[in-house]
Amino acid sequence: MFWAERIAGEIVERYKGRKGTIVVRDEKTVSGRVHIGSMRGVAIHGAVAKILAEQKSRTYFALR
């Protein structure tokens, strides 16, 4: 199983039965110079949001 599928499954299970939209977003913080590690959050949140969308979960993806 792909790690993002496992995380998406945990999210769906956790919020099962609740009304509303699941929001997946990556917030930028002031942490110094931009480096390759900054891409980690974008990649993780993007992969999980894509799987939730493919599973037709109530997902809203915002990248800020």
Image (cartoon, rainbow, N blue to C red):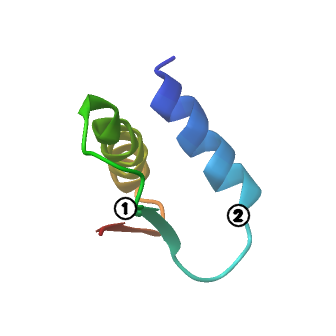
- Write the residue at 47% across / 32% down: 4
Asked whether 64 or 44 is in front, the reply is 64
Provide the secondary structure element on which disc 2 rests: loop
- Write the residue at 42% across / 52% down: 31
- Tag 1–tag 2 contact (CB < 8 Å): no
- Residue 47: image location, x then y, percent: 35, 40
Dot 2 corresponds to which residue?
15
Provide the secondary structure element on which disc 1 rests: loop
Q: How dense is the environment of label 2, judged by Cα within 10 Å: few (below 14), some, or many (20 and up)?
A: few
Q: How dense is the environment of label 1, judged by Cα within 10 Å: few (below 14), some, or many (20 and up)?
A: few
Dot 1 corresponds to which residue?
28
Which quadrant of the rendered structure holds the C terminus? bottom left
Q: How many marks?
A: 2
- Residue 58: image location, x then y, percent: 47, 69
* Amino acid under disc 1: Lys
Which of marks 2 and 1 precedes in the sequence?
2
- Residue 17: image location, x then y, percent: 74, 71
- Residue 35 falls left or right of residue 1: left
- Write the residue at 46% across / 21% down: 2
Task: Name, please, the residue furthest toward the top.
Answer: 1
* Amino acid under disc 2: Tyr
Considering only vertical position in the picture, is 24 above or below 41? below
